Image (tube, rainbow, N blue to C red):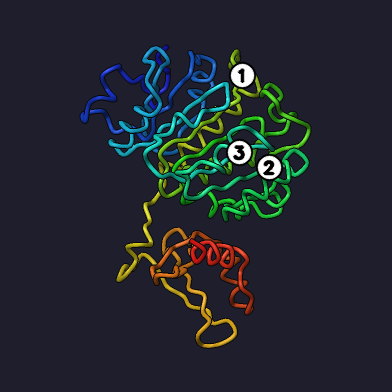
Amino acid sequence: MTPQTSFLEVVPSVALLSQTTPRYLALLVLERPEEALLQALSALYPQSDYLIGVVEPALAYDPIQVIKQAKALGIPSIFIQSKTPSLDQIDPNLPFSASLVSPGTTPIADQLIQHPSIQHFSWIGYQTYQTPPPLLLQLQSRYFSSLRLGAYRENPKAAEPLIRPNTYHFVDVSAVRYSDASDAAGSGPNGLYAEEICQLMRYIGVSSQLDACFIYHYPQKTKPLQIITQLLAQILWHLFESLATHQNEDPYQSKGNSLFSEKEVHIGGPHQAVRFLCSVHTKRWWFNILDKNGNPNYIPCTHEEYLTALKGELPLNWLHHYQKLNAL
């Protein structure tokens, strides 16, 4: 099926193997024919000038190879799947970081927490009564981050720093409450609102090192006017729009760089300081935490955490990462 709008283009079988591939903003990789989804997506209006490559299931590419080849071209891969992704789809030889948006315990949560190659993991939107306490204890013991549904709803901006540094993102459509995604497999009475999942997709789109995003538990048979079809189209639209406006920011190259401003807040005395970095353009913030070897580590944070430090209080996120970096 050929999409009817100019921002979607079916990728020919040789395109992923060629450095002459058109400059796609991202690859949309389909598990099966998704005429209804593409039709719903084509009905939306992009606000930026970009092109999305649609990889149809007939190409039957290995996800690892798709991600590698797309990454070589400087573009991320977006996978639409009905089942929970397997971590076999991630190159086992490379360290990675990941975020998970899901309502509670899933096999992939446990696999990510225990994966030997994972460096950082953030779990967003989980519901406490659906999550075994031992799993959360494992999360804490490895100094990984989490944001339960209620905490996210109180402060949605707190999710952005947790998502920002990660290379892989796993988004469970059943994290959206049943009334907003009635056809999603496993959705329950409580969960994210439709607007909230779209906001999270915007955060994923502006994350610093996005390689791949897996959107899963999408039903196998859909129609263009179904709520779940329209929701997924809008989820993708928000992801594409944020990718189109994303600005690359690397605080590790901030020395002498006018794109960042450095701020130092003294807490308790002249030798006890919390160092911050702020982007001049996007107004995003980072902690600068020295590890036990004296090396700088730039940890994404929020403006509110800077304000907390100005009040003379150590932000809990700073303390969490300080312990992690000095426990290794």
Residue 293 image label: none
Residue identifier under label 1: 219
- For disc 2, the neighbor class at 10 Å (few under 14, some 14 to 19, many from 20) is many
Q: Is residue 154 visible?
A: yes
Q: Residue at x 42, y 15 (%)?
A: 57
Percent coordinates x, y for residue 37 in the rendering: 53, 20
In the rendered structure, which amino acid carries the disc numbered 2?
Answer: Tyr
In the rendered structure, which amino acid carries the disc numbered 3?
Answer: Asp
Residue 126 image label: 2
Query: How far, Cα to Cα, is label 3 from label 1?
Result: 23 Å
Local SS, label 3: helix
Q: Is residue 225 left or right of residue 76?
A: right
Q: Residue 78 occupies which quadrant of the picture?
A: top left
Q: Is residue 49 visible?
A: no
First in sequence: mark 2 vs mark 1: 2
Q: Mark 2–mark 1 contact, CB under 8 Å?
A: no
Residue 110 image label: 3
Q: Nearer the viewer, mark 3 or mark 1?
A: 3
Q: Residue at x 52, y 75 (%)?
A: 274
Front residue of 95 and 40:
95
Q: Quadrant of the N terminus?
A: top left
In the rendered structure, which amino acid carries the disc numbered 1?
Answer: Pro
Q: Nearer the viewer, mark 2 or mark 1?
A: 2
